[in-house]
Image (tube, coloured by chain):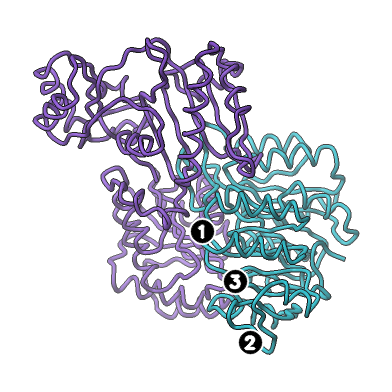
Amino acid sequence: MSILVNKDTKVIVQGFTGKEGTFHASQCIEYGTKIVGGVTPGKGGQEHLGQPVFNTVKEAVETTGATVSMIFVPPAFVSDAVMEAADAGIELAVIITEGAPVKDMMYAKAYATKKGMNTIGPNCPGVITAEECKIGIMPGFIFKKGPVGLISKSGTLTYEASNQVVKEGLGITTAVGIGGDPIIGLSYKQLLPMFEADPETEAIVMIGEIGGDLEIQAAEFIKEHISKPVVAFIAGQTAPKGKRMGHAGAIISGGSGTAAEKMAALEAAGVKVVVSPADIGKAVKEVMEK
Amino acid sequence: MNIHEYQAKEIFRQYGVPVPNGQVAFSPDEAVEAARNLGGKLWVVKAQIHAGGRGLGGGVKLAKSLDEVKELADKILGMTLVTHQTGPEGKVVHKIYVEEGADIAKEYYLGMLLDRAAEMPVMMASTEGGMEIEKVAEETPEKIVKVNIDPAIGFQGFHGRELAFGLGLAKEEIGPFIKFAKALYEVYMDKDAEMIEINPLIKTGDGKFLALDAKMGFDDNALGRHPDILQMRDLNEEEPTEIEAKEHGLSYIKLDGNVGCMVNGAGLAMATMDIIKHEGGQPANFLDVGGGANPETVAKGFEIILKDPNVKAIFVNIFGGIVRCDRVANGILEATKITDVNVPVVVRLDGTNAKEAAEILSNAGIKNIIAAEDLADGAKKAVEAAK
């Protein structure tokens, strides 16, 4: 078991024939992901990476039965692509593209929600179920199979955390990079119950950062609904106020969204919060032995 | 990206958000010319910098004659204005805005930004005009009225009424206020604003609403479709090294410590700063070299970090995913040839091709380079090296 995706998940790629789409789709195929086709308007009928190319998502879904779309289109076209996927009945859109305008995501997410489509990202590494299905840009070899679920706003920090977990002799069920933009799809609050319900997941790691209050919402949720042990790290403890730290959403505004308040809320919810990012793996081992 | 008050007011005018008449000036003579064009007997001379609290810092003054306009313009232009938002070093004033004096009956606050939890914009109004809204929110939160505006339906009358009644406006004031707020919503959405703040919004003696001040910030990701806004960018208001970094695809923010950091990924870059602090050091910067770390970007990264004379050691922390560590290692070697790296460099490379990278670095035998095993080891060694 795992969450969201597994070895049977059928995936299409929007922006399939572009440079990024081609490179990462081929990496996903190599990992074992069932990429069943892709969409590039105007290139319908061609074949790419051994899979059919379609002009529209609707056609791709009808022909292949895909339920998940991995989106690599340029930032200005992201909202269009997400809405097209939702309209075509896709169940989960994984949006890798970085730099989509906030207003566009506001419309796209509202439409996706209306159509019952889940989204992950934008500006994220994607989702991976270890040794089964990789939908995104993460280096697959770091994610060995094991009992730990991982939710993270940051890409490289996801790799770092997984690497530490694996070094402790453990491994990952599913890792979800939720992205660091102001408006994102699935977040801690929606993913935590999925991990709670997944019989293979025994512990959960959540990696947050400054800005917004998703981690605070997560803390409240954990207190009430999560029985599995949770380890958390919040990046940006040393970040100055009012400065955007790389991610569009990583900013402390008006004194709120600080690492300190998020860490305190999580700790109060019974989460094992580590101060040093080097202690994530050790902490997971500790809480699992308890 | 942020813009100046006079630029924000220019945009307001295009959308029918009422503002007093005013003109920007770059010299005392231009200021007098501006005042003469505006007419009247009372003018306000306002320093144009990207920071709040200008009035308290002495950057906003009333003038009752053209001579006084000239005198004040002369004083304010070129001054270093220190406010609670500029930091102790302050900001040099390069331009001023001359505005006609207004008849203020009452001051309010009106602002708009993204409500991340609701995933839609929120408009906020308060009777506490002229005060810092963060302070009002902390001390008297009941004095702030907020309404979320769902873009699917746009700004409706009820949004405006909720705010107007919340402010305790008189019956005849409600119509003009709603018109004002609706126009502001249009500005926010049309221009992909990230934040708009009108503080104060004033009611004049004859019952009109005017934006006496205007602050606007925009979503950087949307600037591509707003060439008019992009033209308003004022490089004087930005940190030169941060601009240079951006031009080379690096994301850099200067801090006060002495351990320079070069990292791939924004989250790991923040975490690297945190662990340096945790190990007893102080990070000198945030630097994300991005997904395409190559010899040139790594070299540029070193160059930018070393512009800060406080830097006594550099911690290179790369977790190779798509970025292969051997390429980064070569980048570091390349960088030491291009740039004179005269401080110890602690290197931690993990992930894709980390072994090959370690060999490349140890074979090169560069004396300044210290290899680290993992994140914690690297942070410890970097903090030690900076002592």
Task: Classify mark 3: helix, strand or loop.
Answer: strand
Q: Amino acid at mark 2?
A: His
Marks 3/2 same chain: no
Q: Amino acid at mark 3?
A: Gly
**Residue B387 visible in the displayed image:** no
Rendered residue at 51%/33% (across/down):
B112
Q: Which residue is mark 2?
A: A48
Name the disc covering residue B351, or none.
3
**Pointer 2 indicates a residue of which chain?**
A
Q: Position of residue B354 (x, y in %)?
A: 56, 75
- Check if mark 1's residue and mark 2's residue have beta carbons within 8 Å: no
In the image shown, does A200 or A101 lie closer to the viewer?
A101
Rendered residue at 83%/55% (across/down):
A195
Q: Nearer the viewer, mark 3 or mark 1?
A: 1
Name the disc covering residue A83, or none.
none
Marks 1/2 same chain: yes
Quote the CA–CA distance across marks 1 and 2. 26 Å
In the rendered view, does B258 fall on the left or right side of B43? right
Q: Dot 1, how many residues are within 10 Å of its Cα: few (below 14), some (14-19), or many (20+)?
A: some
**Pointer 3 indicates a residue of which chain?**
B
Does label 1 or label 2 sit earlier along the sequence?
2
**Looking at the colours in the rendered structure, which chain would you say is drawn in purple?**
B
Q: Which residue is mark 1?
A: A99
**Pointer 1 indicates a residue of which chain?**
A
Q: Dot 2, how many residues are within 10 Å of its Cα: few (below 14), some (14-19), or many (20+)?
A: some
